[in-house]
Image (cartoon, helix red, strand yellow):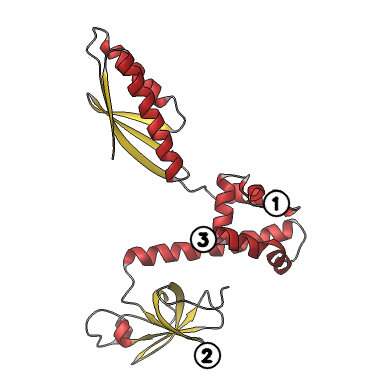
């Protein structure tokens, strides 16, 4: 767990006590801090009955307005969190809970105490990758990432195995429009061949929209390599069609 929440951060917690003037929150990520939501920060507009909006035992996502380290209190807002931010924070929290459990499994697998593992390499993973879940996610996508970042030890192979078995690598999907025409008598054949050239690169899918337009889609782990694959794929198709007296253009969506 981290020690101190920061202003502007989104936190997740459980409503401990509801009173007429506000609600006290147990913060899941900060064991030594309590959160407090003043009634003015519970919901937009006038709040007549606070319990219409929050109740004891409810899991909530709040925005940190300010922190009083000496008192161990973070002042929170419920109304300044939109639905998208709430869903993202809950998913992040679920991911980290899963990562904690997988790290415990790793510790058992290599016959080490979990706290010892955190001290030896766990906290270093969190520092390097931002979170334990991110470390697992990056490892699942590329098992060489640990070695490239200088991580060594008997635990590495087990960490890779656990990541690959339990974490689905992140992916992005991007697309663009390819236009190809060929005036030759056998132009249709050359158009088809140009599209095959486009699909010859891994993870590229070409779909017919309506001649001369075709949708090209690429899935990859990150945006930059996806963009590069899409660009090269379009170039292969355009170069081929131009070699056969045709025309080709590519437009990124």
Name the residue at 42% across, 77% down. 7
Name the residue at 33% across, 23% down. 238
Quadrant of the image occupied by residue 22 = bottom left
Between residue 157 and residue 178, name the one nearer to us. Answer: 178
The residue carrying mark 1 is: 156
For marks 2 and 3 on the same chain, the one whose residue lies earlier in the sequence? 2
In this rendering, the answer to whether 67 lies above or below 203 is below
Q: Circle 3 — which element?
A: helix
For marks 3 and 1 on the same chain, the one whose residue lies earlier in the sequence? 3
Q: Is residue 90 left or right of residue 238?
A: right
The percent position of residue 94, horizontal first and vertical second, equals: 50, 63
How far apart are labels 2 and 3 at the CA level?
Answer: 30 Å
Label 3 neighbour load within 10 Å: few <14, some 14-19, many 20+: some
CB contact under 8 Å: marks 3 and 1: no
The residue carrying mark 3 is: 95
Q: Is residue 234 left or right of residue 246?
A: right
On the question of residue 226 being in view, the answer is yes
């Amino acid at each position: 767990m981290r020690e101190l929440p920061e202003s502007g951060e989104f936190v997740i917690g459980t409503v401990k006590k509801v009173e007429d003037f506000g609600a006290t929150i147990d913060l899941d990520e900060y064991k030594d801090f309590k959160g407090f939501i003043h009634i003015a920060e519970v919901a937009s507009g006038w709040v007549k009955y606070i319990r219409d909006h929050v109740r004891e035992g409810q899991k909530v996502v709040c925005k940190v307005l300010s922190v009083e380290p000496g008192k161990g209190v973070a002042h929170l807002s419920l109304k300044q969190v939109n639905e998208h931010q709430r869903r993202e924070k809950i998913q992040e929290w679920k991911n980290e809970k899963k990562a904690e459990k997988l790290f415990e499994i790793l510790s058992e697998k290599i016959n080490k105490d979990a706290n010892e593992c955190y001290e030896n390499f766990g906290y270093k993973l969190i520092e390097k990758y931002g979170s334990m879940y991110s470390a697992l996610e990056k490892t699942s996508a590329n098992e060489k990432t640990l070695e490239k970042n200088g991580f060594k030890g008997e635990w590495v192979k087990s960490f890779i195995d656990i990541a690959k078995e339990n974490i689905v690598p992140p992916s992005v999907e991007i697309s663009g429009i390819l236009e190809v025409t060929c005036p030759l008598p056998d132009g249709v054949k050359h158009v088809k061949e140009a599209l095959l050239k486009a699909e010859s690169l891994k993870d590229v899918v070409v779909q017919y929209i309506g001649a001369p337009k075709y949708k090209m889609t690429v899935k990859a782990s990150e945006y930059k390599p996806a963009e590069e694959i899409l660009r090269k794929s379009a170039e292969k198709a355009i170069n081929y069609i131009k070699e056969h007296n045709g025309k080709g253009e590519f437009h990124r969506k």
